[in-house]
């Protein structure tokens, strides 16, 4: 049987072949393919399939999706904003000025803030000399609003615009960024906050803290003929950065956050870097983690946390130790000096910020207990993907289960299924793996991005297939994504 061509609306999809010999051993066969095969094989095919009864997921006949596709809300927008992508000058302090691409002449882009349940409409105006899109990282929007070129939309050409409309839910700390090529590493990102009406932690004020790895030149892919030979496997991980920034500021002219003694201050940390794993600590204060990737957790007090590109943690600072203190974000996979910002207490004489002391107690995923665990992911999954993460290919690509996107098979699921993804990292470097369109359960936490540590590290997550469409699943190290570390998760019913 010839391979089935599996062109999508936007092209760029590798066909999948159906091999009748291998049929019973393939645990991920969708009903659509199965029906097609049955039509071809006739009665003989039915016999051949008789021993494979367990192949089907919850919707036995597969003809009626058990869950309908989300559509963008029809109601008028409660909150509208324009996000204009254009060239601009960035001045983080010190000698780090550069001409790059930004949103609304700001770096990071403007904080977009909506109330939970609001209908939002964000108009992307593209004034770049290139195509672009915006992805709303972590928000389970309708598929056509997800901003992934070739997968959910045609990229927006220079001079054109596109309005992203979705319901702002659930509440949480998110960010938005370009999903085209390496544009995120130029400066096309900004925070997106969906406010809770009834937070489970009390606080008197809040700040958003966006961490970034910053280049003063145009980002270049790290795979291809030269990179593998010259830098070796470690060299393909990230470029040398000019600086590490907090809210677009370098340590030479740092961001400053004012607090008053006695206050409780919510700090929303967003790792918007393109390739950096950070360890975050505060001088003079522990941190109480209240949310992981926007999802509320039972508060847990630690000396600090580590997070990868795409992850977010909200913490509560109890302002009980007057002084001038440092927020320090140390790169764990780079040698640049840490990103630094300052916390200053009202009425305290300015002095140079005091950094964190040694940390014995760093957050681990096992410390996170979601206040609302996902339902539908207990018990045995309907479908499991076992995926290796590895370098490979002739030009130093990054592979998921031996394939480099876009020359990679989609991972096929059906609506309503409980899907498990097990990842084994066969490389020495960490991979922050992000799933679009869904939250997943990892241990007792609910997240959308999880770091799989290097050297045979493993992570497993479970999700419910409750948002039909084609969704990207990928490493949030942009250089790995560009080098193939992605798959499309495709609903086939
Ligand atoms: Cu921040 Cu594909 O995502
Ligand atoms: Cu990676």
Image (cartoon, rainbow, N blue to C red):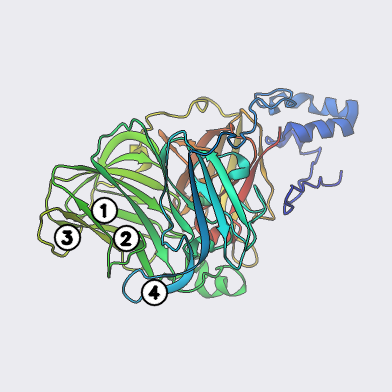
Residue toward you, 452 or 191: 191
In screen coordinates, is 355 left or right of 422? left
Chain-order first, disc 3 or disc 2: 2
Other-residue count near label 2 (Cα within 10 Å), few / some / many at <14 / 14–19 / ≥20: many
State the residue position of label 3. Answer: 354
Q: In 3D space, how far apart are the residues under numbered discs 4 and 2 (Cα atoms)?
A: 22 Å
Residue toward you, 309 or 194: 194
Which quarter of the picture shows residue 342?
bottom left
Task: Please give the label number shown on residue 281.
Answer: 1
Task: Please give the label number shown on residue 97.
Answer: 4
Q: Are marks 3 and 1 in contact (CB under 8 Å)?
A: no
Q: In 3D space, how far apart are the residues under numbered discs 3 and 1 (Cα atoms)?
A: 11 Å
Q: Is mark 2 within 8 Å of ligand 2?
A: no
Q: Is mark 1 within 8 Å of ligand 2?
A: no
In screen coordinates, is 2 left or right of 437? right
Residue 235 in the image: state x and y as whole percent: 49, 69
Other-residue count near label 1 (Cα within 10 Å), few / some / many at <14 / 14–19 / ≥20: many
Q: Residue at x 35, y 39 (%)?
A: 291
For label 1, the SS is strand
Q: Are marks 2 and 1 in contact (CB under 8 Å)?
A: yes
Q: Nearer the viewer, mark 1 or mark 4?
A: 4
For label 4, the SS is loop
Other-residue count near label 4 (Cα within 10 Å), few / some / many at <14 / 14–19 / ≥20: few
For label 3, the SS is loop
């Amino acid at each position: 049987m010839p391979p089935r061509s599996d062109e999508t609306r936007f092209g760029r999809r590798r066909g999948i072949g159906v091999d009748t010999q291998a049929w019973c051993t393939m645990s991920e066969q969708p009903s659509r393919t199965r029906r097609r095969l049955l039509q071809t094989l006739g009665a003989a095919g039915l016999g051949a399939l008789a021993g494979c009864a367990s192949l089907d997921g919850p919707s036995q006949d597969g003809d009626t999706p058990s869950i309908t596709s989300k559509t963008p809300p029809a109601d008028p927008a409660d909150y509208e904003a324009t996000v204009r992508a254009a060239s601009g000058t960035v001045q983080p302090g010190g000698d780090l000025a550069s001409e790059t691409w930004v949103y609304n002449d700001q770096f990071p882009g403007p904080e977009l803030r909506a109330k939970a349940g609001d209908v939002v409409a964000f108009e992307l105006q593209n004034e770049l000399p290139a195509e672009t899109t915006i992805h709303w990282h972590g928000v389970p929007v309708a598929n056509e609003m997800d901003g992934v070129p070739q997968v959910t939309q045609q990229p927006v050409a220079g001079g054109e615009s596109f309005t992203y409309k979705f319901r702002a839910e659930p509440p949480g700390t998110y960010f938005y960024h370009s999903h085209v090529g390496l544009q995120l590493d130029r400066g096309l990102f900004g925070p997106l906050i969906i406010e809770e009406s009834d937070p489970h932690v009390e606080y008197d004020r809040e700040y958003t803290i966006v961490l970034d790895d910053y280049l003063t030149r145009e980002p270049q892919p790290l795979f291809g003929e030269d990179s593998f030979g010259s830098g070796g496997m470690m060299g393909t991980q990230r470029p040398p950065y000019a600086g590490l920034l907090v809210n677009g500021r370098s340590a030479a002219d740092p961001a400053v956050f004012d607090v008053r003694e006695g206050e409780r201050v919510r700090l929303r940390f967003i790792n918007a870097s393109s390739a950096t794993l950070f360890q975050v600590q505060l001088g003079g204060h522990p941190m109480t983690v209240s949310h992981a990737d926007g999802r509320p957790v039972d508060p847990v007090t630690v000396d600090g946390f580590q997070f990868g590109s795409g992850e977010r943690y909200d913490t509560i600072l109890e302002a009980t130790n007057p002084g001038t203190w440092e927020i320090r974000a140390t790169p764990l996979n780079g040698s640049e000096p840490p990103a630094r910002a300052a916390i200053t207490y009202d009425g305290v004489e300015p002095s140079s910020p005091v950094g964190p002391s040694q940390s014995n107690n760093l957050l681990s995923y096992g410390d996170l207990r979601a206040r609302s665990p996902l339902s539908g992911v207990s018990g045995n999954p309907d479908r499991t993907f076992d995926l290796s993460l590895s370098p490979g290919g002739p030009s130093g690509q990054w592979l998921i289960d031996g394939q480099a996107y876009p020359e990679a098979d989609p991972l096929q699921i059906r609506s309503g299924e409980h899907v498990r993804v097990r990842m084994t990292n066969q490389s020495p470097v960490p991979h922050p793996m992000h799933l679009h369109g869904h939250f997943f359960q990892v241990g007792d936490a609910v997240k959308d991005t999880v770091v799989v540590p290097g050297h045979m590290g493993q992570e497993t997550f479970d999700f419910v297939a409750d948002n039909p469409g084609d969704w990207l699943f990928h490493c949030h190290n942009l250089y790995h994504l560009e080098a193939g570390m992605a798959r499309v998760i495709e609903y086939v019913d």
